[in-house]
Image: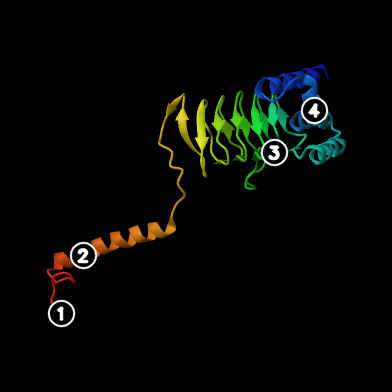
Amino acid sequence: MKRKVNKIKADLRAALEHDPAAKNALEIVLTYNGFHALVLYRAAHFLHVRGFRLLARMISAFGRFATGIEIHPGARIGHGVFIDHGTGVVIGETTEIGNNVTIYQGATLGGTGKDTGKRHPTVENGVMISAGAKVLGPITIGRNAKIGAGSVVLTDVPANATVVGVPGVVVRLNGERLDDLDQCLPDPVEDKICALEKRIAELEKLVAATGLPNSENSEDL
């Protein structure tokens, strides 16, 4: 139980350190739903690992109702975790989260529905998971990685990487940029036009190779 209390204290310190809007510890204890969700999770997890599964799930369900954050009591979460704003966060049963991890609202650490046993992600120390990100399946997010807002991550992420996009791709590693970001949405009409232009060029080359006149150099009959 002492370890649980120490983890709660570390969670409180993390909120104070990472949220510039936090004025003092009392404000966090009384008003932060992310902190409340972690406290309730730690109580539920304490019961879960001791075989009181139904009671643990009841506490978890209450936590979801009270905070808008769903954390399965079977998940394993380290200390110094900060869930900022938090509404809509979902953390699955076999998720493993290390120390000093920051998770923003709407993030999901879930499964794909295709796996058995270990179905959810492993998130190592120091990771930041931005708003709306979906990290799915039994993958590993390496230490100090950053997952961009709205990204969908389905494969392992190396340490010190930044991932963005759907599906997520690594755009920065160890502080160095790997690729230019193209934030424009695809244009299916433009893609079709480009494909048609390419096909027309191919056909013109074929006509030229046969020696037959094309529409540009033939006379009207």
Q: Do we see residue 80 in this rendering?
A: no
Measured along the vertical axis of the image, is residue 106 above or below residue 142? below
* Residue toward you, 62 or 110: 62
What's under tag 4, amino acid-wise? Val
Separation (CA) of disc 2 from disc 1: 18 Å
Looking at the image, which residue sits at the far bottom? Answer: 221
The tag earlier along the polypeptide, 4 or 2, is: 4
Separation (CA) of disc 4 from disc 1: 84 Å
Q: Nearer the viewer, mark 4 or mark 1?
A: 1
Where does label 2 land, which residue? 204
Instruction: Place residue 43 in its image quadrant.
Output: top right
Q: Nearer the viewer, mark 2 or mark 1?
A: 1
The tag earlier along the polypeptide, 3 or 4, is: 4
Q: Nearer the viewer, mark 3 or mark 1?
A: 1
List x then y, in percent, for residue 97.
66, 29
What's under tag 1, amino acid-wise? Asp
Mark 4 and mark 1 residues within 8 Å of each other at the beta carbon: no
Circle number at residue 39: 4
The tag earlier along the polypeptide, 3 or 1, is: 3
Q: Is residue 81 left or right of residue 180?
A: right
The crowd level at tag 3 (other Cα within 10 Å; few <14, some 14-19, many 20+) is many
Separation (CA) of disc 3 from disc 1: 69 Å
List x then y, in percent, for residue 29.
80, 25
Separation (CA) of disc 3 from disc 4: 15 Å
What's under tag 2, amino acid-wise? Glu
List x then y, in percent, for residue 210.
14, 68
Where does label 3 land, which residue? 89
